[in-house]
């Protein structure tokens, strides 16, 4: 293509010698390649991503958690927390174990099969077992989950933690009841897994549910 362009220019400019014209074409092609390579280098430099390194990266930040003390104090202060853990999982277990070391017992529930939280946790509620089309439809009644577990706690237990997974599917009204449950049952603490984040964080459940904070009207 460059040779065709040069022959075309030679036909238009007969006064310029063939050698000078070839020299001019070679110089233009080198300049074009140089500009293209410099542009690529500039584009590559703009695409570089720098990652910051903290102290946790050198001492095993996935095993050593410096915020466990703040976690325990927030559980005692707010009594109901919404947590956000990384997608790969496993981090929330360290915070759960720290509560277990403090003397708490746990009631693990899934929000997808919870039904009405107020009825399931604090009232006698009916449960209809699957009849598979061959058995008569029955209805069984179960005691309140929270009150039943509280009655089984040993004397030296500090309290009961209701740990709810997949709480992101709950409605705002259901989250509001869970945030108010510790005020109805003083020995109960509520931890709700409301989503995922890049690192393990938590917030007061009242803030997530749209309720005023403790002490506010």
Image (cartoon, rainbow, N blue to C red):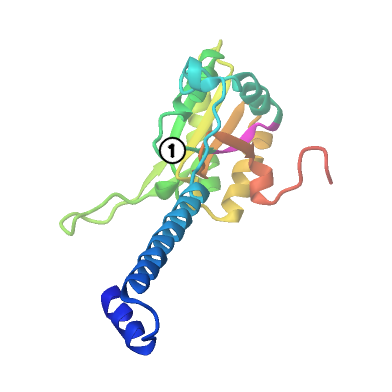
Q: How many marks?
A: 1
Direction from residue 74 to residue 192 in the image, left or right:
left
Q: Is residue 116 visible?
A: no
Which quarter of the picture shows residue 136? bottom left
Residue at the top extreme? 156
Residue 16, compared with residue 110, is above or below; it is below
Locate the N terminus by quadrant.
bottom left
Residue at 35% x, 65% y: name it.
Answer: 26
Residue 86, compared with residue 168, is above or below; it is above
Direction from residue 137 to residue 135 in the image, left or right:
left
Which quarter of the picture shows residue 34? bottom left
Residue 160 place in picture, x, y as percent: 54, 25
Residue at 37% x, 71% y: name it.
Answer: 20
Direction from residue 178 to residue 2 in the image, left or right:
left
Residue 179, compared with residue 116, is above or below; it is above
In front: 202, or 15? 15
Which quarter of the picture shows residue 25? bottom left
Residue 43 place in picture, x, y as percent: 48, 54
Residue at the left extreme? 134
Magenta stretch, main secondary structure class: strand
Q: Which residues are magenta?
A: 78-83
Mark 1 lies on residue: 109
> Counting other residues with Cα less than 10 Å from the Cα at mark 1, is it few (<14), some (14-19), or many (20 or more)?
some
Whether 82 is among the magenta residues is: yes
Residue at 66% x, 36% y: name it.
Answer: 184
Q: Is residue 48 visible?
A: yes
Q: Secondary structure at mark 1?
A: strand
Residue at 59% x, 19% y: name it.
Answer: 66
Residue 30 place in picture, x, y as percent: 39, 60
């Amino acid at each position: 293509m460059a040779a065709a362009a040069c022959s075309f220019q030679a036909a238009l400019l007969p006064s310029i010698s063939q050698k000078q014209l070839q020299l001019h074409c070679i110089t233009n092609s080198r300049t074009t390649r140089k500009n293209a390579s410099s542009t690529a280098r500039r584009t590559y430099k703009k695409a570089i991503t720098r990652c910051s390194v903290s102290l946790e990266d050198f001492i095993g930040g996935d095993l050593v958690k410096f915020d466990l003390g703040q976690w325990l104090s927030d559980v005692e202060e707010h009594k109901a927390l919404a947590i956000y853990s990384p997608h790969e999982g496993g981090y929330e277990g360290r915070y759960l174990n720290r509560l277990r070391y403090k003397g708490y017992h746990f009631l693990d529930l899934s929000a997808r099969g919870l039904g009405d939280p107020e009825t399931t946790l604090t009232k006698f509620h009916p449960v209809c077992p699957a009849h598979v089309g061959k058995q008569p439809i029955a209805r069984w009644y179960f005691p309140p989950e929270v009150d039943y577990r509280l009655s089984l706690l040993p004397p030296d237990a500090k309290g009961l933690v209701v740990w709810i997974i997949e709480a992101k599917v709950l409605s705002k009204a259901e989250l509001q009841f869970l945030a108010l449950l510790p005020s109805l049952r003083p020995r109960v603490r509520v931890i709700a897994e409301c989503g995922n984040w890049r690192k393990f964080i938590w917030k007061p459940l009242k803030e997530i549910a749209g309720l005023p904070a403790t002490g506010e009207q």
